Image (cartoon, helix red, strand yellow):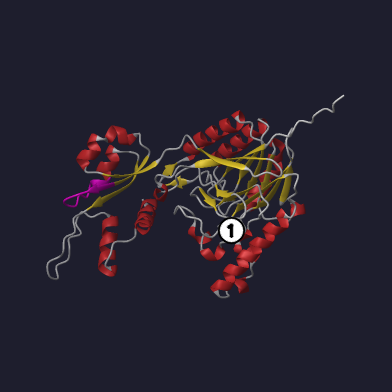
Amino acid sequence: MAPKKTAKPRRARIVHTSDWHAGKTWKNVDRLGELEAVLDHLARFVEAEKVDLLLHTGDVFDTGAPVAAAERVVFKFLRRIGDAGTRSVVIAGNHDSAARLDAWGTLAELVHVHVLGRPRGPDAGGVREIAVADGPTIVVAAVPFAPVRMLMTAVEAADDETLVRQRYDDGMRRIVAALTARFRGDTVNLLMAHAHVQGAKLSGSEREVHLGEQWATTAQALPPNAHYVALGHIHKPQDVAGPSPARYAGSPLQLDFGEVGETKSFVVVDAEPGLPASVRTVPYEGAKPLLDVRATYAELERDAERLRSSGHLRVRVPLIAADPDANSKVRRLLPNAVSVDVELPEVAPAGDAQPSRAGLSPLDLYRMYCRKTYGADPEPPVAEAFEALRMAQE
């Protein structure tokens, strides 16, 4: 009698998502409803595809003390996919409160959610083994956001810049090496981290204080024996060149106008021990896009019906002469215009005469100041930051 053939274990299916920034208010716009719609789409995918494990690589919330409504949206999603049998591993990002995540993580394990607020050693929760029904065991090495003070002393941080960069990178290498030493040949091996890897392209909406190159690690710090490296912190979805397949999942929403045109997506990984993983992306559904519009008043009136349903708009209106009511005119016509600017013809002042400031918007006055002081308009990101600060004071 021929021996019975043992069925080959199926591949494990993993989804990687990141940088939700739940509770973020952007230019006085509450975008929590959009995030909830996006997470509903993601949950439906997880349920339909019978995903074994979801990885969230940090910045779950936009602040360390999120509003209750934001927590409700996040907890509702995690409970929903937990009820469907999907396990989750969530790490803290630089926007999250590590202590707060660790606290609610003690309850989240009841719905198969493993939470890590601070970097820990392999035996203290930094490495998790996830059992998959009829499939391989998954080993997850997790590195939440590591503040500089955790890896370096104040004295070291005062050293020369080259040494600072090297010491930070060395610290990250040691953390990653200690955790990934638990990878085995008979498991699916995953590294997840909230970190800036040198060479990653920024969207412009990331928090600059944590993105200086001196606080970046190198791709060489990533392990060569991972099926997949899940990265968070950078909002632009992108692959990272390294010794193993690695990717920033990016944010599910376009978070600022530097991200106009970006297709936001989550990552789906199918993996089994001893073989390369299959990695693909799936676009999110449910968010409103951000759009740049340059048009005259007449063109805006003509296209108003279409533009009102086109997403969040940054509108630029070319004018022959200053119009003090330009901002309110556009916003009355297009309630979804979150940023309004005008273009005025350049007029060289005669002799020592100063150009008139009558009817100019604060942004126009700022541009005039930059032209006079520096001989050029401010860079677009600087102008956007000025406008954002001004609107926050209104």
Horizontally, residue 117 falls left or right of residue 370, namely right
Q: Height in image: 384 above or below 11?
A: below
Residue 161 position within the rendered picture, expressed as x and y whole percent measured from the top left: 54, 72
Q: Amino acid at mark 1?
A: Ala
**Which residue shows up at 58% across the image and 37% down it?**
72
Magenta region: 316-327
Tell me where residue 166 appears, x and y as whole percent. Answer: 60, 69
Q: Which residue is mark 1?
A: 219
- Above or below 318: residue 41: above
Q: Residue furthest top?
A: 1
Q: Residue 224: percent from the left, percent from the top?
A: 66, 54
Q: Nearer the viewer, residue 35 or 86?
A: 86
Q: Nearer the viewer, residue 2 or 61?
A: 2
- The image quarter containing residue 50 is top right
* Residue 349 located left or right of residue 290: left
Q: Is residue 288 above or below residue 170?
A: above
Query: Which quadrant of the rendered structure holds the N terminus?
Result: top right
**What residue do we see at 26% from left, 59% from top?**
365
Residue in the foreground of this view, choosing between 142 and 274 = 274
Q: Residues within 10 Å of mark 1 (few under 14, many from 20)?
A: many
Percent position of residue 131, x then y: 74, 39
